[in-house]
Amino acid sequence: MKPLALFLLLCAGLIARDQTGTNGPPPDNGSRYIVDDESFEKEACKKVDQLAKEGMLKNYSDLAKTAPKNHPSTPLAPVSTQSLEPTELANVLRHSTVAMGLRYQDPHTRKWHFMIGATGFVVAPGIVSTSLHVMTIDPGMMRDAQAVAITEGGKVYPITEIVAASDRADTSLVSAPGLDLPSLPLRAGVLPGEQVWCMSHPDGFSYMFTSGQVARISRDRCDEKHQPALHVEVTAEYCPGSSGGAVTDAAGNVVAQVSSINNYDGFTTGNGKAVSGIVSARTCTAAEEMLTLATAGANEPIPLPTPPQRRKTHAPKKPAGEKSGTSRKSGSPAP
């Protein structure tokens, strides 16, 4: 091989080696929000413990007992008409979404524990929308509990009041004084087939952003005493911990709020033949129900916590949510 050709070949190899060495993940220039779930929850726990020592936290039971009979009008942000790219939308939703932290007391040991158990989003200064079942107590797991709102930056704000509530529609507006994040608008009238996005904290995975579409609009009556609630069922993924999360359109308008998951794992035909298959219906509270809470009116009665029952045996019982065709609340502390 001629000397000149050999020289050019060696130069090409060095250039290729240098390019290979610089390939890989791009440098983090601060434009990406990178979640450290363990650190996020650990730091929140420290701040919550300090707030507890200062007497700044309020028990769920007290919030339920002192909730007003009537709720005031809440000023809402105007509906947005500007569609966003998914990456832009993720940033917008994250800035307005909080993790609902739960400091709860074990019913047997009386020890206090902490977890990130649900999701909420800001609709007005100091006002967070979340599912009502997030603000109630599972007596099998909790003697009492205290709720806080945690921002993406790790700031912690105690929940001091249930401002408005609908047990029928499983939604509520709660007060977090000092919390001043951008408010998400509420938009009624979403249609089947519309594309939607969801920001939530499923099972401790903070600020998960998923997408899907509206599968159907439905009504469901919790009992004969109440009018049926309006629901939006979506295909966007979420799981326990997501309750209270915003489901939005491309412009960042909230069209629904995560409420529950209904799992159907099969049925038996008339001749006794078992038919297997799993269908998950992700049911959300429609924005119309939240808009009602933002208008002055009467609050529905808030379920008061029931004291834990003494067990004669420590043998674990099968959760009711394991039965076929039953609903499991997404944000409840159930398994």
Image (cartoon, rainbow, N blue to C red):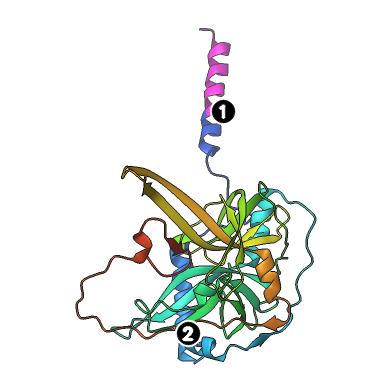
How far apart are labels 2 and 1 at the CA level?
A: 71 Å
Q: Would residue 331 be seen by someone viewing this image from the given angle?
A: yes
Q: Which of label 2 and label 1 is nearer to you?
A: 2
Residue 144 in the image: state x and y as whole percent.
Answer: 41, 84
Residue 179 relative to residue 40: left or right = right
Q: Quadrant of residue 176?
A: bottom right
Q: Nearer the viewer, residue 62 or 85?
A: 62
106 in relation to 290, above or below: below
Residue 97 in the image: state x and y as whole percent.
Answer: 61, 66
**Label for residue 15?**
1
Q: Quadrant of residue 244?
A: bottom right
The answer to whether residue 307 is magenta is: no
The answer to whether residue 3 is magenta is: yes
* Sequence-wise first label, 2 or 1: 1
Q: Would residue 32 be seen by someone viewing this image from the given angle?
A: no
Q: Nearer the viewer, residue 164 or 225?
A: 225
Identify the magenta region: 1-16
Q: Residue at x 29, y 83 (%)?
A: 108
Residue 248 in the image: state x and y as whole percent.
Answer: 66, 57
Give, as a three-letter code, the residue at label 2.
Leu
What residue is disc 2 on?
Answer: 304
Q: Are marks 2 and 1 in contact (CB under 8 Å)?
A: no
92 in relation to 278, above or below: below
